[in-house]
Image (cartoon, rainbow, N blue to C red):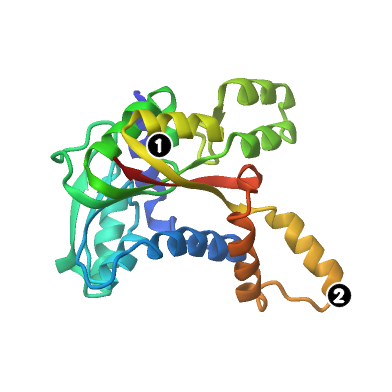
Amino acid sequence: MDSTQLIRETYDKVAPSYDVVRYRLHWFVYENLTWNAVAAVLPEGQRLRILDAGGGGGKYGVRFAERGHHITVLDLSPGMLEQARACFDRRGLLTHATFEVGSILSLPFADGAFDLVFCEGDPVSYCTSRYGEAIRELCRVAAPGAFVVLGVDNRENYFRGALQSEDPAGALTVLLTGRATCPYGLPIHAFTVRELEEAVDAAGADVVEIFGKPVLFREMLEALKAARGPDFDPWEAREEILALQERLVHEGYATAGGHFQVMARRR
């Protein structure tokens, strides 16, 4: 079975329960950090053509649609696209969206077709050694000057996780090559900041910022609990925690994040 088919079958299986929140506070912070950086660059009063590549169940796509933009949600998994279509339908936003089964390694769109390209989560990392091709495709379909937003796995985070796993000897491979396995058991490429900068540049775009999300999250919660005492409720303090994370993630702590978010613009 090739990697594309494996990814498609994995996400078809998890599609019905994919948006069940297991780590509520973490994902509240993560999703808001992701969205806030993108929302900050959306122009007022313009209806953009936006590609949500690897858009899964549509949780970010509907946010764009709610602002009046037209979204093309592309995913390898027909099951995930069914979830996305249902998500748009529940909100009365189907007229703002189209849905395409496809791969980011070979996008079925013309050069410069989109005013913003958004590829959040692991799609680029799933391309393993072909990640450069994927980034070139994502930049190709962006209009000149358009933002290209990429979410990818952070090598340092996977390295530290491997050290704490049942096979810590495998951590050296992660550190030296970036080869790792995601929580679904799929092979991924975990990046360094330098790799991302070079790949984006080679794809014809300029990096505006690379930040981690969230950063020092567990450590930050431990510090807050120690400072506030035993009655501290992290969920009740979620807006304060998000505000603190908003500050930290843009202050140079990228490698302390679970994921990287790349904000780039096509030349």
Please rate how many residues cluster around mark 2, counting C-alpha atoms within 10 Å: few if below 14, some from 14 to 19, many from 20.
Answer: few
Position above or below: 211 against 125? below
Please rate how many residues cluster around mark 1, counting C-alpha atoms within 10 Å: few if below 14, some from 14 to 19, many from 20.
Answer: many
Position above or below: 9 against 119? above
Tell me if 89 is positioned left or right of 189 in this view.
left
Tell me if 20 is positioned left or right of 246 in this view.
left
CA distance separating discs 2 and 1: 41 Å
Residue placed most toward the observer, 5 or 60: 60
Tell me which residue sits at (16%, 39%) in the image. Answer: 111
Tell me if 7 is positioned left or right of 251 in this view.
left
- What is the number of the mark on residue 124? 1
Residue 131, picture quadrant: top left
Position above or below: 97 against 56? below
- Label 2 sits on what residue type? Gly
Tell me which residue sits at (61%, 70%) in the image. Answer: 243
Residue 230, picture quadrant: bottom right
- x, y percentage for residue 185? 52, 35
> Circle 2 is placed at which residue position?
229
Q: Secondary structure at mark 2?
A: loop
